[in-house]
Amino acid sequence: MANLVVAGGGAAGFLAAITAAEAGLTGVHVLEATAEPLAKVRISGGGRCNVTHACWDPVVLVGHYPRGGRALRGPFSRFAPADAVAWFADHGVELITEADGRMFPSSHSSETVVAALRTAAHRAGVQLHSRCALKGVVAPAAPGELFRLQLRGDGSTDAPGRCRRLLLATGGHPSGRGLAAELGHRVQAPLPSLFTLRLAEPRLQALAGLVQEPVGLELQLVGGARPWRQRGPLLLTHWGCSGPALLRLTAFAARDLAMAQYRGWLTVDWTGGMAEEEVLQLLRQQRSTYGGRSLGAQRPLEGLRRRLWQALLDQAGVAADLTWASLPRAGEQQLLQTLVASRYAVVGRGPFGEEFVTAGGVDLAEVNLATMESRRLPGLHLAGELLDVDGVTGGFNFQHCWTSGWLAGRAVAAALAAGGNSEG
Ligand SMILES: Cc1cc2nc3c(=O)[nH]c(=O)nc-3n(C[C@H](O)[C@H](O)[C@H](O)COP(=O)(O)OP(=O)(O)OC[C@H]3O[C@@H](n4cnc5c(N)ncnc54)[C@H](O)[C@@H]3O)c2cc1C
């Protein structure tokens, strides 16, 4: 028998188990189906682990979660990025902030984060059972009774078969969603989030690796009621496009994109938000100031990358060796439209960005977000990616894991301390 069994040795599960054990709870066990706990932390952020984001206002922070959003204000006001920074500092991991707000360990290695979590768990007395999967749960029939656990795997022999409280922190794995559903929870169907887009545009594909910043993006999906918009850096790839603005766009539009089978049109404003009239004036200025220069050699916007400008001239059907003075009015109009509203066919989903995150999961309405306890089944807690919460790229997904894990661990320790902390 155990006081707390955590199913899932990932970011959320570890933080919950450590928090409960550091608060004095004994009999805390983590079950991890694979041989390697914290595997996603290890591979995260390109091996550097983007632990959190330097965003200190919970109201601003929730704007980075396409699913979760305002409901997360409460949890983030209890355990915010600043608390995560302090927690890691207390456990020997100093975080540094990059220019765009992403926070990484100063060692630039995710191993530091993995080691800190494992050491903290060990010191606090958390018992880890690798190769031990939770396969089934029999819920307590009455208050005071125990959860009965059905386990599988080499590591199951010394793992507890019963517990007073159970935390599901199984990430995006289908087994956890299945268990939550069996225990009475509504589960939103899983969908990919944070992916790139495939475009039918060989001219742009030839520019793979080029970043244009900022651009305005507008995504209109087949059968979609309203367009989705974002602004920021765009990365061109050999299949289409990626980069922060695009990943944010696909994260927010994830459900509509899936419904449209990833088909639609992406309109790119290469000027990053200039008014059409302003761009027209710029083009006319080129004509009057640099009339003798060729279009290819003289860009109208300083920030527009040279190779991109040449591809846009080609796209507009305007010869690059034409001089500005001899550009016909029709060509000027073509260029104007190409600069402010280039329309590209979206023909599918591209590979994932640095993060792979599942949208969907256990409905937040059925969870008490102060304790992460199920509103359907007392004694059951849920945390991390298993919930219907996902953030955009930048450390927001881990932040939700730290927050929900910490809240669950603290609540379990408090509840069991109130009712007696004994391992029978
Ligand atoms: C390549 C990549 C890079 C990423 N980089 C970042 C980043 O830099 N910053 C960021 O914020 N986010 C990043 N993410 C997202 C982030 O990794 C996830 O949001 C986060 O790991 C989710 O944590 P979790 O604890 O909820 O689930 P997980 O980390 O998935 O952990 C769940 C664990 O439960 C185990 N498990 C599943 N079912 C069972 C079962 N039935 N019994 C026992 N164990 C079970 C799994 O094996 C797994 O170890 C990245 C994701 C990927 C894939």
Image (cartoon, grey):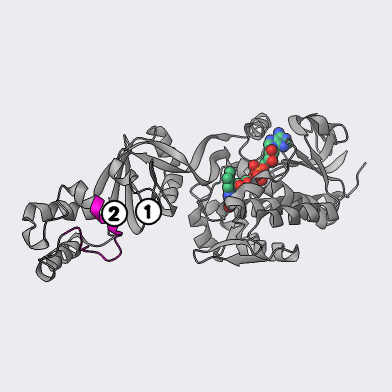
Residue occupying image coordinates x 29% and y 50%: 268
Query: Residue 210 got which mark?
Result: 1
**Are circles 2 and 1 on residues that touch, CB within 8 Å?**
yes
Residue occupying image coordinates x 14% and y 64%: 293
Q: Find out whether residue 302 is within the magenta segment.
A: yes
Gap between marks 2 and 1 measured at Cα: 8 Å
The amino acid beneath tag 1 is Leu
Q: Read off the residue under disc 2.
A: 308
Image quadrant holding the N terminus, namely top right
Residue 3 in the image: x percent, y percent? 84, 44
Q: Quadrant of residue 297?
A: bottom left
Whether disc 1's CB lies below 8 Å from ligand 1 is answered no
Compared with residue 95, is residue 415 higher up or lower down, i.e. above or below?
above
The amino acid beneath tag 2 is Leu
Q: Main secondary structure of the magenta part?
A: loop
Q: Quadrant of residue 128?
A: top right
Q: Is residue 185 visible?
A: yes
Residue occupying the far bottom of the picture: 289
Residue 57 in the image: x percent, y percent? 54, 65
Dot 1, how many residues are within 10 Å of its Cα: few (below 14), some (14-19), or many (20+)? some
| 242 horizontally vs 105: left or right | left
Q: Quick one: SS at disc 2?
A: helix
Residue occupying image coordinates x 28% and y 44%: 203
Residue 197 in the image: x percent, y percent? 39, 41
Q: Quick one: SS at disc 1?
A: loop
| 149 horizontally vs 304: left or right | right
Q: Find out whether residue 285 is within the magenta segment.
A: no
The magenta segment: 295-311
Compared with residue 289, is residue 198 higher up or lower down, i.e. above or below?
above
Closer to us: 308 or 40: 308
